[in-house]
């Protein structure tokens, strides 16, 4: 077993020297070039040739500077497991990986055993530093995965317990409030632990780690990091699944009656709520590319929604049974679904076509930042990877939990090669090499941000908040000029009004007085009647042409629907 980096070449440890920075390969420079350069040899205009030569030189210098700065701004390179000989990566156990990695990485591999509160569901912040864990039997925890600090013990209407555990390869038992907690880990910290007195179905962080929402037995609640209840959102009802749209500050939920709710957490306004009409659903996921919510239903369909429309944007028949899992790739163009028909399908959302169908059942799915797909059912986890770049996923890693552990949810930790697992006996964390983004952008997600930086980031995100109307299937259309539409067909009332206006205009025309014998009243009436018919003729002819085209289209569609052998039995409509 070995660890290979993304570019396939090893890299020595230690600070980067000036000689290494100056030595930049052509492949690294080519990554930052702006396409192919202009062919200056075929250009005869000397002035244009000189301008393009100066521009190409500037582009080359900027690409080389960016490649040099990459060694400073992106000091870490991602890697993945590389099998040697006949060895298979999915046969490598977690114990073997823990012996090969450094001490800080081995501390990220642990098991938290809480049999009295499971099964658990998990959620991570965008920086990957904090994790929210919710037990179905009334247990909520916010965990700081990096730093140790003073833990406060609070007590209110709920029982609030603060525990800090540092364990070095041994089992430690904590007893508190009549409960026994067994921690098996190298390093773990509980920031805030709250035991509520009702079931908790789902938990999700809001815009940062200071606030989180919990879907409890009857209503939806919002808590702060210290476990204090801030809001009780009764309009959502008994919520089964939660999602938070961070760019729009919208909290989306679906309850046991199939009602979808969107609530703005900045103003408290209910943006929209409507019935899906497809019954109970506990499969809900947000597309990170466009903010569209996808819900899986018992009929095997996946519907995509936006808050400004009560009708679904897309209806997809994905499986021949209930949909059990749903996940989106970070680029937003790839979707993975799992159903009771024991199939896992990968969909291209640009064409809404199936790219790959894999055998197997999955209760929960999740994509990592680097595109690895984790599937779990029962007590077995399988990780799939696309290493060829052709969106052809194959088996990468596997992991079996202890016998009797029923997995509830899997979730990759951002910017770490870690997979969080919520199961019936607590939650666990395993190492998946190559899962997380190796370098973080401090302007997007900073695991080491201070309280001042967090406040400034919160203000910036509120100023950059997108309205709910910006959610659409193709967000690249925002800011473009709308193309000229074809003239819409007028309605029946509009046609009648147009004919009446033409008749009134023809009647108002004054006739010329002619010589004696030609101004008889009968001749004037006849001329007015001819003028009215002349004004109505183009409108009536246009109406007749539209009816004929409709009949032709209807006839062609009927012919296309039936095979040739049965077309002679088709019912023929009466011609007028």
Image (tube, helix red, strand yellow):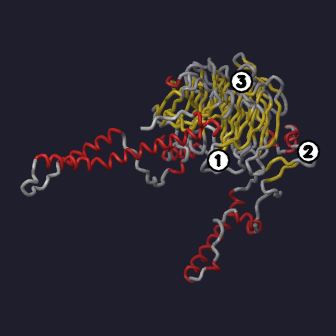
As drawn, which residue projects farthest toward the front?
A: 517
Whichever of callouts 3 and 2 sits on the residue coming sooner in the sequence is 2
As drawn, which residue projects farthest toward the top?
A: 178
Q: Are marks 3 and 2 in contact (CB under 8 Å)?
A: no
Q: Quadrant of residue 189?
A: top right
Secondary structure at badge 1 equals loop
Residue denoted by label 1: 331
Residue denoted by label 3: 119
Q: Residue at x 23, y 45 (%)?
A: 503
- Left or right of 268? Residue 177 is right
Secondary structure at badge 2 equals loop
Is residue 543 visible in this depiction of the protein?
yes
* Distance in Å between CA atoms under marks 3 and 2: 35 Å
Residue denoted by label 2: 87
- Left or right of 32? Residue 498 is left
Which sits in the foreground, 101 or 186?
101
* Distance in Å between CA atoms under marks 2 and 1: 32 Å
Q: Quadrant of the C terminus?
A: top left
Which sits in the foreground, 408 or 501?
501
As drawn, which residue projects farthest toward the right?
A: 85
Whichever of callouts 2 and 1 sits on the residue coming sooner in the sequence is 2
Crowding at label 3, few (<14), some or many (≥20) Cα neighbours within 10 Å?
Answer: many
In front: label 3 or label 2 = 2
Would you place residue 131 above or below residue 485 in this image? above
Q: Residue at x 58, y 30 (%)?
A: 213
Q: Quadrant of residue 129?
A: top right
Is residue 202 visible in this depiction of the protein?
no
Q: Quadrant of residue 361?
A: top right
Q: Are marks 2 and 1 in contact (CB under 8 Å)?
A: no
Would you place residue 361 above or below residue 511 in this image? above
């Amino acid at each position: 077993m070995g660890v290979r980096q993304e570019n396939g070449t090893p890299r020595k440890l230690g600070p980067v020297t000036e000689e290494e920075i100056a030595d930049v390969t052509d492949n690294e420079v080519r990554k930052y070039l702006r396409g192919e350069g202009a062919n200056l040899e075929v250009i005869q205009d000397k002035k244009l040739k000189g301008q393009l030569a100066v521009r190409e030189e500037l582009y080359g210098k900027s690409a080389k500077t960016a490649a040099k700065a990459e060694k400073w701004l992106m000091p870490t390179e991602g890697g993945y497991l590389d099998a040697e000989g006949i060895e298979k990566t999915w046969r490598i156990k977690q114990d073997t990986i823990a012996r090969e990695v450094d001490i800080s990485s081995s501390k990220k591999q642990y098991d938290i055993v809480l049999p009295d509160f499971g099964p658990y569901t998990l959620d991570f912040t965008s920086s990957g530093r904090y994790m929210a864990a919710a037990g179905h039997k009334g247990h909520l925890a916010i965990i700081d995965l990096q730093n140790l600090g003073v833990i406060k013990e609070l007590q209110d209407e709920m029982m609030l317990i603060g525990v800090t555990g540092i364990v070095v390869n041994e089992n430690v038992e904590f007893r508190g409030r009549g409960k026994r907690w067994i921690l098996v880990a190298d390093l773990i910290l509980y920031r805030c632990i709250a035991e509520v007195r009702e079931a908790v179905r789902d938990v999700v962080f809001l815009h940062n780690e200071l606030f989180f929402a919990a879907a409890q037995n009857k209503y939806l609640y919002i808590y702060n990091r210290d476990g204090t209840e801030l809001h009780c959102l009764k309009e959502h009802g008994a919520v089964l699944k939660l999602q938070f749209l961070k760019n729009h500050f919208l909290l989306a939920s679906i309850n046991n009656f199939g009602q979808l709710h969107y609530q703005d957490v900045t103003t408290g306004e209910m943006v929209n709520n409507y019935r899906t009409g497809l019954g109970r659903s506990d499969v809900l996921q947000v597309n990170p590319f466009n903010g569209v919510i996808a819900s899986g239903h018992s009929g095997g369909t996946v519907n995509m929604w936006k808050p400004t429309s009560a009708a679904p944007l897309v209806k997809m028949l994905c499986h021949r049974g209930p949909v059990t899992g749903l996940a989106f790739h970070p680029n937003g163009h790839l979707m993975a679904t799992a159903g009771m028909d024991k199939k896992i399908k990968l969909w291209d959302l640009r064409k809404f076509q199936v790219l790959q169908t894999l055998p197997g059942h999955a209760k929960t799915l999740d994509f990592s930042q680097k595109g690895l797909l984790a599937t779990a059912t029962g007590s077995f986890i399988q990780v799939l990877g696309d290493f060829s770049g052709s969106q052809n996923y194959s088996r990468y890693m596997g992991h079996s939990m202890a016998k009797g552990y029923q997995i509830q949810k899997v979730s990759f930790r951002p910017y770490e090669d870690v997979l969080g697992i919520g199961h019936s006996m607590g939650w666990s964390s395993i190492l998946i090499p190559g899962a997380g983004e190796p370098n973080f952008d401090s302007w997007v997600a900073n695991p080491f941000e201070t309280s001042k930086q967090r406040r400034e980031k919160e203000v910036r995100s509120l100023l950059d908040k997108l309205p709910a109307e910006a959610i659409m299937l193709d967000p690249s259309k925002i800011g473009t000029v709308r193309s000229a539409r074809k003239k819409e067909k007028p309605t029946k009332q509009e046609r009648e009004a147009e004919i009446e206006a033409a008749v009134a205009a023809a009647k108002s025309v004054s006739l010329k007085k002619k010589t004696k014998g030609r101004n008889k009243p009968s001749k004037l009436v006849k001329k007015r009647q001819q003028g009215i018919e002349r004004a109505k003729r183009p409108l009536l002819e246009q109406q007749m042409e539209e009816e004929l085209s409709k009949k032709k289209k209807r006839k062609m569609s009927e012919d296309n629907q039936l095979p040739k052998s049965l077309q002679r039995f088709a019912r023929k409509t009466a011609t007028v």
